Image (tube, grey):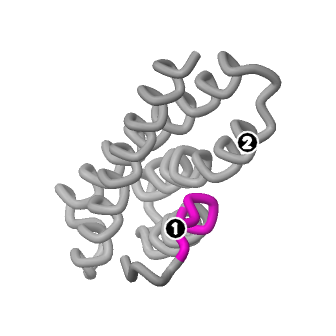
Amino acid sequence: MNKSCKYDLEERLLVYSANIIRLVEKLPNTRSGNHIAGQLLRSGTSPYPNHGEAQAAESQNDFIHKLKISLKELRETKRWLRLINYLEMIKSCDYVHNLLNETEELIKIFVASIKTAERNK
């Protein structure tokens, strides 16, 4: 990331959700493709609004809880992405690999944020 660019997790989660939606639209219109698409759409777009919920938390415990929901959804998304990659469900493997890498980075960010919030309780 460019040092002159302000780090904005909200914007990063917005772009991530949009990329998940784009991937879902590329999945095959089959029974398995539709099932995975629905699951991925739910879990992959959930961290963005849950991050917003965390920002409006009523307490430190509520804040941590909302962050943990985002983390849980990111971990689920990682599993769906791995399955899509394993089954070679789309032609552009780079797209899935890039999303997997971003998912890993976001997981690390949320783990660190949760640890910091718990330490500061």
**Left or right of 14: which side holds 44?**
left
Q: Is residue 11 above or below residue 34?
A: below
Q: Residue 45: give x, y in percent of width and height.
A: 59, 54
Q: Percent from the top left, x then y, of residue 65?
A: 61, 22
Q: Residue at x 29, y 71 (%)?
A: 98
Image quadrant holding the C terminus, namely: top right
Other residues around mark 2 within 10 Å, as few (<14) / some (14–19) / many (≥20): some
Q: Residue at x 40, y 46 (%)?
A: 109
Name the amino acid type tagged 1: Tyr
For marks 2 and 1, give the CA distance. 16 Å
**Where, quadrant-wise, is the N terminus in this rendering?**
bottom left
Q: Which residue is mark 1?
A: 7
Q: Amino acid at mark 2?
A: Gln
Question: What residue appears at the point 53 percent right and 44 percent down from the top-left corner?
Answer: 43
- Magenta segment range? 6-12
Q: What residue is disc 2 on?
A: 55
Which quadrant of the figure has residue 55? top right
